[in-house]
Amino acid sequence: MLTARRHKYGARPTTWAGRRFDSQAEADYAAQLRLLEQAGEIADVEMQPKIVLIPDVLTYRPDFVFTERGRPVYVDVKGVLTSDRLRIVLRAWAKFGPGPLRLVKRARRGDAFLTVREILPKGAGT
C-alpha cells in the first residue's frame, strides 16, 4: 500500500479557491494577496512563475509575483530558511534576479506575515 509522503517540515498541502498550495501559510498569503488586489494596492498576481536565473543551469519558482507601484515583486512564503539550495538561489537572485524577492513568514501570533528577508538584485531600483 502506498502512503502519502510527509513534508520534511510538516507543511500540509491545502486547497483554497480551487487551487492547491504546498502549505496552509501559502494559501493564507494568497488570500491576503487577493484582498490587496481587490483593494487596488497590487495587480497582476501570478502563482509560481518560472524564473530562469542562469540559463540551462538554475531556475527558481517563487510562490508569487505581483505588480506593486508599477514594478514586479516576487515572494516566497517560508516556514524554515535552511536548505543549501535556497542559499544558492538567493546568491544567484542577488546577481541575476528580475526584481526584489521577499521571503515572508507567518508571524508567531495571528494571521500577519513578516518579511524576514528581501533580496534586491544588482541594478534593481527600489
Image (tube, rainbow, N blue to C red):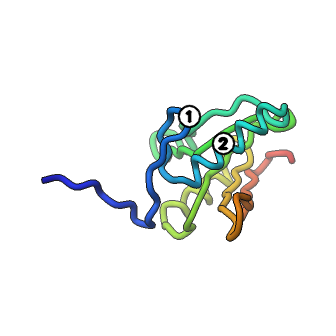
At 74% from the left and 60% from the top, the residue drawn is: 115
Is residue 77 rendered to the left or right of residue 43? left
Q: Secondary structure at mark 2?
A: helix
User: Where residue 86 sits in the image (x, y, percent)?
Assistant: 53, 61
Q: Is residue 47 visible?
A: yes
As drawn, the residue found furthest toward the left would be 1
Residue 4, numbered circle: none
To which residue does mark 2 refer? 31
The amino acid type of the residue labelled 2 equals Ala
Which quadrant of the structure image shows residue 74? top right
* Viewer-closest of 35 and 126: 35
To which residue does mark 1 refer? 17
**Considering only order in the chain, which callout, 1 or 2, is on the residue closer to the N terminus?**
1
**In the rendered image of this protein, does residue 35 appear above or below residue 83?**
above
At 66% from the left and 62% from the top, the residue drawn is: 106
* Viewer-closest of 100 and 11: 11
